Amino acid sequence: MKIKNVTIAGGGVLGAQIAYITAFHGYNVTIWGRSEGSIQRVRPRIDKLHEIFSKELEIAPSYIGAEKPDYPRALFNDETEITEQKIDELKEINENTYRVIKYTTDLQEAFSSADLVIEAIAEIVDEKKAFYEKITPYLKNDAILVTNSSTFLPSTFRDYTGRQERFLSLHFANSIWRQNLAEVMGHDKTSEEVFDIVVEFAKSIGMYPAIIKKNSLDIY
């Protein structure tokens, strides 16, 4: 399965960051919000991220040839990739990124064509359960659903997703462009193939995936 269309459910601080880094790395990104008010609140966050990435790329030439440079690791694969040419390419990408992200409150528009849905709504169990039940009728059969929750195990929600084998946890850190560790955790019903697809997706957006096979909160 090739992931192309990614929907982020929730446009809070971290949801906006996930959306931006995913779009920056070439995916078609839609942010779903519960209301127009939610959409209006996320737009300034996306604009701010455009500004942050612009500043990061402006100072990036100072990392060229530096010993152990403290560079934004979600933007460059490694130190050798930090060149004037690559920086110019990323500046162009950044100027396009915040313009191509789509926003919607419509469930059909947000989820019917999504290959991957990243749930980043409030850390409230009942709200998450209700959200999964609400979007299930709109998802493609092969769509993958992940939760960004850092509080709850994926097994907490699997029975509400309608796709136990295609559901798992993908948790990101704040300041995602620099703190690029992403924790990937399945549960006892998660397909190994789906797990591997999510790991590769994380890598493709500049993350370093911490692969967690144990369905336990001990790792948090």
Image: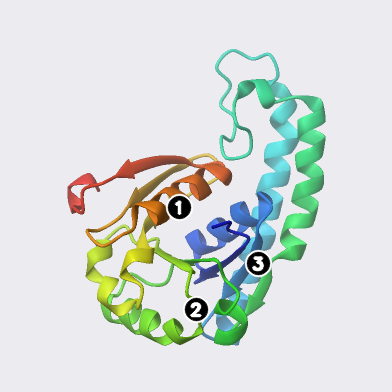
Looking at the picture, which amino acid does disc 1 mark?
Val
Few, some or many C-alpha atoms within 10 Å of disc 2 (few <14, some 14-19, many ≥20)?
A: many
According to the image, label 2 marks what residue? 139
| Coloring scheme used | rainbow
Q: Position of residue 206 (x, y in %)?
A: 56, 41
Choose between 168 and 152: the one closer to the eye. Answer: 168
Image coordinates for residue 157, horizontal then vertical, percent: 27, 72
- Disc 2 marks which amino acid? Leu
* Residue located beneath label 3 in the image: 44
3 or 2: tag closer to the N-terminus: 3
- Classed neighbour count for the residue bearing mark 3: other residues with Cα under 10 Å, few (<14), some (14–19), many (≥20): few
Q: Nearer the viewer, residue 192 or 220?
A: 192
Query: Badges 3 and 2: C-beta atoms under 8 Å apart?
Result: no
Label 3, label 1: how many angstroms apart (C-alpha)? 28 Å
Decide if residue 23 is on the left or right side of residue 207: right
Name the element at disc 3.
Answer: helix
Q: Is residue 47 left or right of residue 154?
A: right
Seen at 31% across and 69% down, the residue is 164
**In this rendering, the label closer to the viewer, 3 or 1:** 1
Observer-nearest residue: 171 or 66? 171
